[in-house]
Image (tube, rainbow, N blue to C red):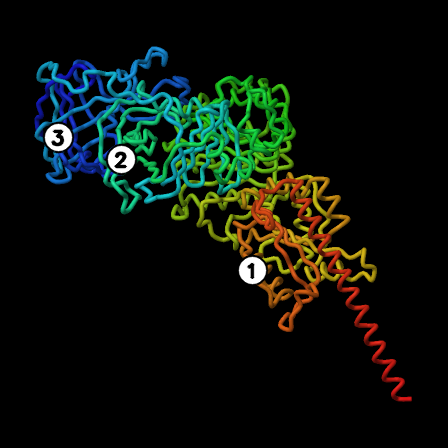
Amino acid sequence: MQRVPSSCIEITVKLTDNGSTTDNCLTYDWSQITNLTTNYTAYIEPNTNQTYDVHIGALTVLGTMDNYSLNYVCPPMGYNGVGSGCRTEPNTQLVVLQVNAFDGKLYIIDIILSGVPFPSSQDLKENQPPFGKARITFNLGVALQPTGYFQICKNKTSEQCPNQNISTHKLPHPLPSNYGYGIFGIQEFNLITNSTWIMDDPNQLLIVTAGTNYYYFNATGFFYYDSNSKTCTWSATCNYVCEAYNYDSRFLDYAGEWMITKKWGNEGMEPVNAQIWIGNAIDAAGVFPIVMFIGKETGHYIGLDKLDLIPSPKMGATYWFTDHGDTIPRVSIKAFNPSVVKAGCVTKLSDWTELASASIFTNIISVTLINLQHVNQINEFQRCFPNLICLSLCYNNEIDVHRLCKIFNHIQNPIKCFEIHCDYILCSHRHTSHFFSKINNLNFTIEYFLLDMTHGSMTWRNNCSQYHKTCVLMTTTDFIQIMPNIRYVHLIVNNINIDKLLDINNWKGLVMRCHHLEKITLKTNKSISQDTQLTENILKIQQELSNVNDVDVSSDDDDGSDISNYDIDLIDHSPFPNDCQNEVQGIEFLCQYFMHRYNACPTFLIGSLEEACQEAFSSIIIKERRPVLVYIHHDKNLLTNRFCWNILCSEMIIDYLLENYIVWPWDITFESNRNILIKIWNKIFPSQTSIDFSLEQCPMLIGIMRESLYKKDSSSTSEYEFTVLFKNETLTSTEETFSLKSILNELSIFKEECDDNEQALSFDLIKKLIFLGKLLLKYANISH
């Protein structure tokens, strides 16, 4: 066994039927090894021409060698920028097993060292512990067994070690700037998706992607863009240096050269000659135990296999870049799509590429802060983001509500949306009398509060100092009360903890104290429909809350009779009534909903779409005619709130629409109302291409004008034609991400087209009338 590059220990292998421990022995469980099915990589060893499968993961191992434990220990929070999200179990080793594909024997175990006792990064030496790996080599191989145990025991000290010159192999620091396009995969979920790495070291810029997750790093932090929710958030917890410079020989040990012949998720790949590095990376993702691949000929970073910290048969993930090359400074970054501009993070590329610590971002309205330690730092973020309306705090463990109160005291921006993501809320009842005294001012601007307590998978511990059974719920509702104008509360929990949130008295107290509260949503990470008692309790709470302050209550399903999905709405003011057959009633309902949620509402036409079209084009004065703008709303599309708050309900848009458009809205949150809209649409546009009215397309803006002279044909049976101006987040004509300016411009262009069309139709009518008059005159002359 080799741990320090210049010294080894000779070992003996003992097979045993029990898992007992002895001095200077490590005891392994064969069943764990044979069940460790995570295999992302296969390679040919160049010196022996033997093929090996590489299995990675966590094993439970007992014992020490020379009183030194090889068990993995999480670094302390804050070490080299690491957050507190690292979790593992006692007696766990993170291992890379190399099994011969021909004889099925185990020949090498590489054990990733955790870094204990975690010296300062300035004191770390390349290719030396406490980071890196320990290697156990079996010269003749060990045949895998289905059950039982085996021990690796110290025999004697040996000086016969390879790689005695520790400076022979070192990772370049930093890595050469290169780009890579390939895949990101997780075997457990059979997930294979796209991945990107573009490193521009001269300009301190880096783009990393995995599926729908995009990370844009610069010298001061990074933007995170989620292409599903179309949201971009800023974090200063890790910058370019933090992400790119910790891939070096202080944390990673050289493990040889492999001719890689197989990578999971890459069928039919060509063999790749790579240098292998095993150990830890410490970056924006926290602690990152990895097997890292560097192209031997190019020196490019071409991928890695990631190990998870908890023993499980099929865990981990892989990045592998099949297309890679040298980065052209700034050019490669600018060519990437979606750019940081198209993602909606900044208005122009230089706001990101030339970012300084004192920059002001007027375009950013949402920021996520990870493991915020010093509450006074909130002032700096608010200064950099003066138009901030949504603040999200993410913690990798539990959170003390007293700390949240201190954060509230430092919030000066008019925040409308406040989110907390953590394991759970700590008990506040030891100092209940001091709870509200920590609040200098109540926050009257927050309307939406989300609390996500799914980061931890275990049942909540009840350490309440006052022995309250619903301590977490009581603490949460107490905290919500410091937001007097709260309208929407959204709690997300693991299904094993949902019962701790079902106390009717707590919910009644919250509803009675927060008079503006419209909706409370509980969401679980797994279905609870099979738990009859639990669903009955939820229905009972819904029924009782329906009598408090005349608040409507319904489940999240269309018919209100079955709780079969994961969302459970305890209080629900929906935008439209379910199965709304009366357009007047539905639109009046939507107007009230807009005023409740956004404190503003465009002037909607109260009536049918057919009546809206008649109102728009019936005037005999051409200049008084206006196009119809149809707005399609879906309350469960994550983009809807942002669009309504920032665009549709802005004073500028409301005033413009009042003068230039007839606006007709419809809500499709309920499937029944989507079906009604389809019938309405097909009646007015029977011969035109249908529209995809779906959650993913919302919010939508559709312009309607009278059918153009140039588009009329004999098969058309409609008086009108429509154009989809905007859907989801994109302007249809330019494929740009929306902004107030771009939406106004698009509306103005369509209005001009409609005006021109009305002029053309009027001239055509005049020509026809003149022609008809001439015919009548000619007929009259003939008659005489």
Nearest to N terminus: mark 3 or mark 2: 3
Question: Which dot marks residue 469?
Answer: none
* SS at badge 1: helix
> Disc 3, disc 1: CB below 8 Å?
no
Secondary structure beneath dot 2 equals loop
- CA gap between label 3 and label 1 equals 62 Å
The CA distance from mark 3 to mark 2 is 18 Å
In the image, 458 versus 409, the foreground residue is 409
**Which circle marks residue 312 in the picture?**
2
Which residue position is annotated with label 1? Answer: 675
Q: Name the residue rendered at 41%, 25% in the picture.
A: 243
Q: What residue occupies the far top of the structure in this picture? A: 123
Image quadrant of residue 690?
bottom right
Counting from the top left corner in percent of width and height, residue 316 is at: 31, 35
Judged left or right of residue 291, residue 740 is right
> Where's residue 733, x and y in %?
60, 50
Marks 3,2: beta carbons within 8 A: no
- Judge whether 382 appears above or below 159 on screen: below
The amino acid pointed to by label 1 is Asn
For numbered disc 3, what is the local secondary structure? strand
